[in-house]
Each structure stands twice: as C-alpha cells, then as structure tokens.
Amino acid sequence: MTLARTVPDTPAPRAARFAHLLVATCALAGVAMELAVAVTDGPGQAPTHAERIVRLFSFFTVQSNVLIGVVSLLLAADPYRDGRVLRVARLDAVLCIAVTGIVYNTVLRGIGALTAAGPLSNLLLHVAAPLLAVGVWLWVGPRPRVGLATVWWSVAYPLAWLAYTFVRGAATGWYPYPFLDVGELGYASALVNAALVAVVFLVLAGAARWADRRLPGAA
C-alpha cells in the first residue's frame, strides 16, 4: 500500500502552475501554427508533403519548443513532479530553448523567413518561448534539480540531433540551418559551427548547474 502525497495548494504552487502553463501555451501554439500550415499548404519547397512534415520536425527550433511545451505541461499539472528522467528532460528543455533564442537572435535573424506561418509564429518560437522558459525556470524552478549526472545526460539529446542532422543531410542534401549546410560550407566549416553551438550548450549547462545550487529552492 502506498500513501498519497498531499500538497497544499498554496499561492506559490498556483503561481508555478500558471507560469508553466504560460510557457507551454506559447511554445505549443507556435508549433501548432507551423504544423497547420505544413499540413494544409502542400509540399512547399520539399519534394513531397510527407518530406515537408519530416523537415518541420527536424528543425531544432520546433523540437526544442515541443520539448519545453511538454515538460511545462507536466509541471503545470504538478509543480512538485520529480524523477531522474524528468530532471534531464527539464534541463534539456530549458537549455535547448535558450540555445534556440540565442542562435536565432545572433545568427539567423534577418536572413529570411524561417517560419511558414508568419511573424506571430516566429515571435512565439524564437523570442517569447525562450524568454519565458528561462524566466520561469529562474523563478519557479523546480529547484534544486541539476546534479552533475543530469548535466552530462542532458548533452545526449543535442549531440543526437547534430548527428541526425548531418546523417540525414548527407542522404537528402537538405539541412535545417544555413550554418550547418555541408553542401554550401563544406564539412569543415559546418562541423566547426556545430561545435560552437555545442560549446554554447555546455556553457549554459554549467551556468544552469551553478544557478541551481545558489538560487532559493522552488516548488
């Protein structure tokens, strides 16, 4: 027999639920807008309609918004939710959406339309979701949750995405971002750019661990 956990619904958990729900709504709304256009607008620049859908979900932007959206929904349902897998997923979600915001606003802004659904979707995916996600993590956590093992496990996903991007790009000739386009840049430059993004991720992961140990506990 197990005892049910009883947690009083104090103002702090209520605020945490609202904050997580706001992040989830922002991120998933942007993804939904892009998916709606991809589903209804035909193949676009892709050779087939199915390929267009695959390409949509191959973008790191879309994946990071889906990840932060799902994790935020779980925390909106229960701000006290915990577990090894959730700790890695939460850190990954925050770091990946932060990288999305940083790379877009320092490298990709202004080079062309990155979102088929238009300016609102672009704002939600590349600006609002990253800012809100990081702000909510700093405010309501949950914290402490970032151990050294969590940091190292969090690196697995972005490395897997980079490997997938280069392998699929070699097979199809399509790359989601110009700075990873081997056809235009060559492998040397594309790999250097990928390494720079990986370094940004690791620096942010180290900063997250530092902040997690020093900020007040939350939820």
Image (tube, rainbow, N blue to C red):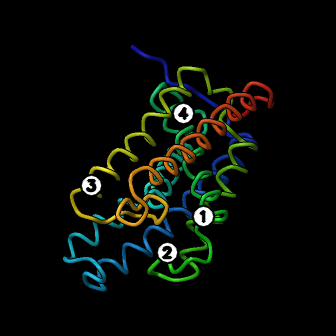
Q: Residues within 10 Å of mark 1 (few under 14, many from 20)?
A: some
- Tell me the residue that label 4 is attached to: 81
Looking at the image, tell me whether mark 3 or mark 1 is earlier in sequence order: 1
Q: In the drawing, does residue 149 fall left or right of residue 110? A: left
Quarter occupied by residue 132: bottom right
- Tell me the residue that label 1 is attached to: 104
Give the spatial CA distance, label 3 vs label 1. Answer: 22 Å
Give the spatial CA distance, label 4 vs label 3. Answer: 36 Å
Give the spatial CA distance, label 3 vs label 2. Answer: 20 Å
Label 2 with label 1: CB-CB less than 8 Å: yes
- Depicted 183 relative to depicted 201: above or below: below
Looking at the image, tell me whether mark 3 or mark 2 is earlier in sequence order: 2
| Nearer the camera: disc 4 or disc 3 | 3
Label 3 with label 2: CB-CB less than 8 Å: no
Quarter of the figure with the N terminus: top left
- Tell me the residue that label 3 is attached to: 168
Residue 164 rendering spot, x and y as whole percentages = 32, 48
| Nearer the camera: disc 3 or disc 2 | 3
Residue 87 rendering spot, x and y as whole percentages = 53, 31
The kind of residue on which mark 4 rests is Arg
Q: Residues within 10 Å of mark 4 (few under 14, many from 20)?
A: few
Q: In the image shown, does 89 or 19 lie closer to the viewer?
A: 89
Which mark is drawn over residue 114?
2
* Residue drawn at (56%, 77%) of the image: 111
Residue 90 rendering spot, x and y as whole percentages = 54, 39
Give the spatial CA distance, label 1 vs label 4. Answer: 31 Å
Looking at the image, tell me whether mark 2 or mark 1 is earlier in sequence order: 1
Looking at the image, tell me whether mark 1 or mark 4 is earlier in sequence order: 4
Label 2 with label 4: CB-CB less than 8 Å: no
Tell me the SS state at disc 3.
helix
Q: In the drawing, does residue 49 fall left or right of residue 36? A: left
Looking at the image, tell me whether mark 4 or mark 3 is earlier in sequence order: 4
